[in-house]
Image (spheres, grey):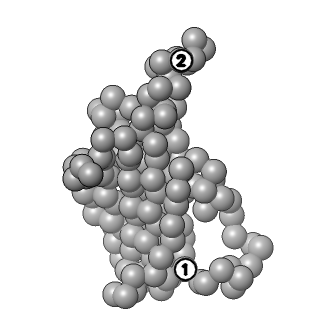
Amino acid sequence: MTKALTCLELSLPALPQCVREARLAVGETVASLAATKRLADDVRLCVSEAVTNVVRHAYGRRRGRVDIVVERDADELTVVVRDTGVGIPPPGRRGDSHGFGLKIIDELARESTISRPAEGGTEVAMALDLASAEKAARLSPCTVQ
């Protein structure tokens, strides 16, 4: 078992203008890992959705932060977005009025989890398969990188 390498640790104010900064920083990091353009785009979208959820729902009128960590091991990329806000409601209490952000993350990530850490807040962890993305890019004649 290989130890994961931390590629990015970022802490930003949970403000609307920081969604773009988070997306760009994570996108540059993933692109530097020799990942495919498609994977980098997927990760950017997932991070945008997760950070937007923090900005919109985590702190109400209080100020807070959003923390992002990107790690890589041999064939997997893990992205974690966390806050120390009010926490996500349990399943069944979220209602139908919520957007599609978590659904998008579920669709694009190989695996995703949402948890409520003991210290409070919400943590969204996304695992993406680097090996499959790189193999698909080599096999597909239509992939533009």
Q: Tag 2: residue type? A: Leu
Which residue is under mark 2?
Answer: 139
Q: What count of labels does the image hold?
A: 2
Under circle 1, the secondary element is loop
Which residue is under mark 1?
Answer: 88
Residue at figure coordinates x 53%, y 50% from the top left: 110
Q: Tag 1: residue type? A: Ile
> Eyeballing the image, is 52 above or below 25?
below
**Extreme residue toward the right, this view:** 96
Q: Position of residue 136 (x, y in %)?
A: 53, 26
Is any atom of residue 5 visible in this view? yes
Could you classify mark 2 by the number of other residues whose Cα lies within 10 Å: few (under 14), some (14-19), or many (20 or more)? few
The residue lying toward the viewer, choosing from 21 and 48, is: 48
Residue at figure coordinates x 54%, y 75% from the top left: 57
**Extreme residue toward the top, this view:** 141
Could you classify mark 1 by the number of other residues whose Cα lies within 10 Å: few (under 14), some (14-19), or many (20 or more)? some
Measure the alpha-carbon separation of dots 2 and 1: 40 Å
Is any atom of residue 48 visible in this view? no
Residue at figure coordinates x 69%, y 85% from the top left: 93
In-image side of 102 versus 21 (left or right): right
Residue at figure coordinates x 29%, y 46% from the top left: 73
Which numbered disc flags the more N-terminal residue, 2 or 1? 1
Q: Position of residue 4 (x, y in %)?
A: 25, 52
On the image, which quarter does residue 118 sit in?
A: bottom left
Q: Position of residue 97 (x, y in %)?
A: 75, 72
In-image side of 6 versus 121 (left or right): left
Under circle 2, the secondary element is helix
Q: Which mark is residue 106?
A: none
